[in-house]
Amino acid sequence: MNTFIEYAPIVIVVIMFFLQYKIFVTPAQISELKSELVEYIAEHYVSEKTHRDNNTSLENRIDRIDKNVNDVKTLLISIVQWHGSTNN
């Protein structure tokens, strides 16, 4: 009992430190933090499936643009060659 009374102030200070700096949390606090985190992620990030679909769509559009640019380039080259051959 004397040992308990001797160390009681230190134990009280340690417990107050833990409580003041919120070292220990309750399951309700963890659940609340989890729900806030899920809401934040839903608002600020997209799902992997959405990202993959958008990336695939963008790649397809870029491929079509490249094909169209190559078609226009080929057409312009043929027009320039045709005009060059008729002027000679």
Image (cartoon, rainbow, N blue to C red):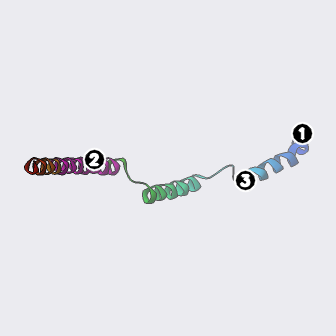
Q: Quadrant of the N terminus?
A: top right
Amino acid type shown at disc 1: Thr
Cα gap from disc 3 to disc 1, whole angstroms = 27 Å
Q: Secondary structure at mark 2?
A: helix
Region in magenta: 50-74
User: Does 69 appear in magenta?
Assistant: yes
The residue that disc 3 covers is: 21
Percent of width and height locating residue 14: 80, 47
Query: Which residue does the numbered mark 1 point to in the structure image?
Result: 3
For the view shown, which residue lies furthest in the left direction?
A: 86
Q: Amino acid at mark 3?
A: Tyr
Real-space CA distance between mark 3 and mark 2, rounded to the nearest whole angstrom: 50 Å
**Which of the two marks, 2 or 1, is nearer to us in this view?**
2
Q: Main secondary structure of the magenta part?
A: helix
- Among all residues in the image, which is located at the extreme top? 3
| Residue 37 % position (x, y) | 51, 55
Name the residue tied to disc 2.
59
The answer to whether 46 appears left or right of 3 in the picture is: left
Residue 28 badge = none
Lower sequence index among marks 3 and 1: 1
Q: Earlier in the sequence, mark 2 or mark 1?
A: 1
